[in-house]
Image (cartoon, rainbow, N blue to C red):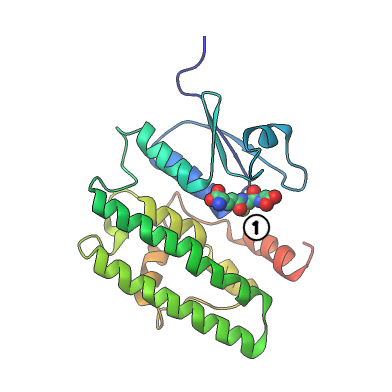
Amino acid sequence: MEKQNEVVLFGTWASAFCKRVELALKIKGIPYEYVEEDLTNKSESLLHYNPVHKKVPVLVHNGKPISESLVILEYIDECWNNTPKLLPEDPYQRAKVRFWVNFVDHQIMARLLPIIMSRGEEREKAIKEFNELLKVFEEGIKKDFPEEFPFFERKSLAYLDIVVGAHFCNYEAFHEVVAVVFSPEKNPAIMAWLEALKNHPLMKPPHDKLVAEMRGKYLGQSP
Ligand SMILES: N[C@@H](CCC(=O)N[C@@H](CS)C(=O)NCC(=O)O)C(=O)O
């Protein structure tokens, strides 16, 4: 007989996109099996389950695959709807959360690569642009969610905490390997939020492992 709720996550440990899905499953208390993928040698299962993008994360629920991390988060929220909600009930609030998640994924994240790739004055300029976008984000969420801000005072992590936390709560490793990009002077509310997120028991980033990974990836240094 088929199991009622068989959940398998294909992921890779250092990926923020995969971390999002793991966080959602843990917040909702959903038991799952985790399969670590080697992206230099993708498994037949991954290629079978995500033939379009061939990327992780992929969630397989009772044999049915779902790809794209944000699609997976929404699927989890809809399927296990008697557990803590990731998205707000109100459609307008939901739209605003989706708007800012999109802003983080497409605008803010796009500014990280120029920082990684550049040096000297060019890097300073890239960091300044990154901080300006963070400021837009900070002001935007304060205006859109005045009652909820700061988010970390909520009982349970929600959609925006998951996305922001998975991307940025490892910022200390990024500072150590690449450059200091977050500062309490420039982005006080975001920094306070990240500080709380990184100390959350589900969020805690594996600092030393990440530093080694980033040194290899960004600086070409082997461990
Ligand atoms: N938009 C995708 C991005 C996923 C993604 O970029 N996954 C990376 C790991 S961080 C991957 O699987 N890369 C393998 C490849 O590009 O071949 C999502 O949100 O799930």
Residue in view at x 32 percent, y 35 percent = 83
Provide residue 16's location: percent of width, then percent of height: 55, 54
**Tally of numbered discs:** 1
Above or below, 86 relative to 31: below
Q: Position of residue 28 (x, y in %)?
A: 38, 38
Q: Is residue 33 above or below residue 121?
A: above
Determine whether the beta carbon of the residue marked 1 sits less than 8 angstroms from the nearest atom of ligand 1. Answer: no
At horizontal 51% and vertical 46% (from top left) the residue drawn is 69
Q: Is residue 60 visible?
A: yes
Q: Position of residue 211 (x, y in %)?
A: 65, 64
Residue type at numbered disc 1: Lys
Q: State left or right for residue 25 relative to residue 215.
A: left
Identified at 43% across, 59% down, the residue is 102
**Farthest-out residue, front:** 52
The residue shown at (58%, 56%) is 206
Left or right of residue 59: residue 101:
left
x, y percent for residue 156: 32, 48
Q: Which residue is mark 1?
A: 209
In the figure, residue 76 lies in which quadrant?
top left
Which quadrant of the view contains residue 53?
top right
Instruction: Check the picture and name the quadrant holding the C terminus.
Output: bottom right
Q: Specify the farthest residue to the top.
A: 1
Nearest the viewer among 192 and 63 is 63
Q: Does residue 177 appear left or right of residue 6 in this picture?
A: right
Position above or below: 27 against 157: above
Going by the picture, which residue comes out furthest to the bottom? 121
In the structure shown, which secondary structural element does the residue marked by tag 1 occupy? Answer: helix
